[in-house]
Image (tube, rainbow, N blue to C red):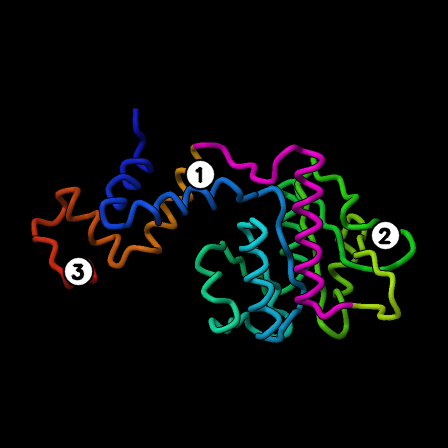
Amino acid sequence: MIGPAMKNCKTLEDFMLPERVERLRQVAAWRTRNLILVLDGVHDPHNLSAVVRSCDAFGLLDLHVIESNARFRVSRKISQGAEKWLDIHRWPEPKSCAQQLHAQGFELWLADSRPDSLPVDQLPWDKRLGLVFGNEHAGASAQMREQATACFHIPMHGFAESFNISVAVGIGLALAQRGRQAQLGRHGDMSSDEIDQLVEDWQRRSVRASDLILRRLAGQDGQELSDDTLGG
């Protein structure tokens, strides 16, 4: 039996090219909710936009942004609209974010090159992990350091001692994806029902006036669908 989510998917598929529908399903199958990214006080819009793009590219679904220094702003020129495919959670300060994630079963691993930190590709990927990256200049806040489970670093072998935050996130997520595939046999970890729900959500975001279309096709509105409604 087809549930409500799948019914809506099938309905909206009539307003999308088949190739686009298949692409949404392929990408959704690679998404993970057991690996998340947390940005603690990162404020530069260029860096934020590049990070958003990396999250999408490496299969993350959830990005948590702590707005202690500035409100979350994205340049679509840099992000290329990748924020459309993420669930972005905003927090006013670190402690409430960390406590909520701990309650959801996440360990918070902080990017820090101190001696006892682990290389990022050696983290316990069988657990729910949040990778935390701090502010571009000051690093992670004291509140977040108190809440962190442990620390990780990106192995480096040159004279440079650090990366730009957006570069560090990109490398970290690439290694995380590879580590998850090596340890778990796959990166995507959502059930078929969760994938169906995600595809439905993405279709709603992709099809113009999707909520109006669904209401009218469900008989809640007797008006005809016009070319203007559909964006035709």
Mark closer to the chain start, 2 or 3 = 2
- What residue do we see at 8% from left, 53% from top? 224
Cα–Cα gap, marks 2 and 3:
54 Å
Q: In this view, does 132 lie to the left or right of 216?
A: right
Disc 3 marks a residue whose amino acid type is: Thr
Disc 2 marks a residue whose amino acid type is: Ser
What kind of secondary structure does the magenta stretch mostly adopt? helix
Q: Residue 229 carries which label?
A: 3
Residue lying at the far top in this picture: please name it.
1
Considering only vertical position in the picture, is 1 above or below 158?
above
Disc 1 marks a residue whose amino acid type is: Ile
Q: In this view, does 126 lie to the left or right of 209?
A: right
Boundaries of the magenta span? 163-192
Neighbour tally class for label 2: few under 14, some 14-19, many 20 plus, Cα within 10 Å: some
- The answer to whether marks 1 and 2 mark residues whose Cβ atoms lie closer than 8 Å is no
Mark closer to the chain start, 1 or 2 = 2
| Camera-nearest residue between 101 and 30 | 30
Cα–Cα gap, marks 1 and 2:
34 Å
Residue of label 1: 195
Residue of label 2: 117
Percent across and percent down for residue 60 are 57, 50
Residue 122 located within the stretch drawn in magenta: no
Determine whether the residue tagged by mark 1 lies in a helix, strand or loop. helix
